[in-house]
Amino acid sequence: MRTFIDISSDKIGIYWLGEPIFLEKTDVDIKIGEKLVELDRKFGFDDILVLNGPWGFTNLRVWSLALNLLKTLKNDSINFCTISKPELYNLFYSRGLLPRYWILYIGQKSNVWLWDTEENKLVKMVKKAEIEDIKKEYGELYLDQVYDKAYFWENKDQIAYTFDNWKLILNWDKTFNREEIAVNNVDKIDANYMIEPNVS
């Protein structure tokens, strides 16, 4: 089964040929193994594209571990590809579909990142409540996709993508095929935190 798994948002999205499955980030360490085994027994994973990072450390770590374990249990018969949100959004930007600056969800309730796509770097961490001020300073920008529509107040500048039949569909009309987004073939999934975890 070809599958896309988004481990970089407020919910885990598992996309396949049926209706997508969304798992809450709470209790992810308990639910993930059971859900992956259930889906694998029913459909059989063979190709998984992972939207990997940044996001909360625990969830990225648990999901990468669970996916690697599943691959080991299946005698390495699963093909992994990964792409980070900045890499994905850089692709959109290169096609002229998105402006230069965007707000990146990083798994925190009130803090987000301002990202510069042209320079491919973090500009600064800001409070979510400061987004309107950031728009005045940086001009047009867009907001990261999160599944909880209330997180960004259902803002019209929020990006939206979904996956259908192994294609990514951006804002319901721009389509990207697998070859365009599955750029990093990997033997195992490494959690892509993009910043150093605070272990103090």
Image: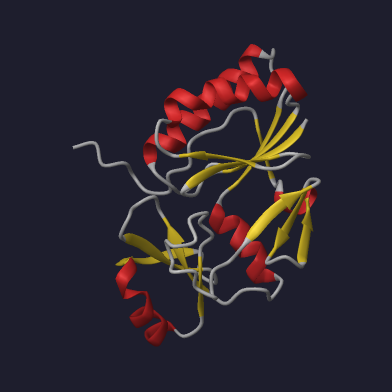
Tell me the quarter of the image containing the N terminus: top right
Vertical order, 126 against 148 (above or below): below
Residue at the image position 49 percent from the left and 49 percent from the top = 9
Image-based side of 197 in relation to 76, left or right: left
User: 79 or 16: which is nearer to us?
Assistant: 16
Residue 18: percent from left, percent from top? 76, 39
- How many callouts does the rendering have? 0
Identity of the residue drawn at 78% across and 46% down: 166
Residue 21 percent coordinates (x, y): 62, 39
Q: Is residue 186 above or below residue 77?
A: below
**Residue 178 in the image: above or below residue 39:** below
Quarter of the picture holding the C terminus: top left
Vertical placement of 179 versus 133: above or below?
above
Please tell me in which quadrant of the rendered image residue 34 appears: top right
Residue 19 at least partly seen: yes
Scheme by which the image is coloured: secondary structure
What residue is rendered at 78% in x and 40% in y? 17
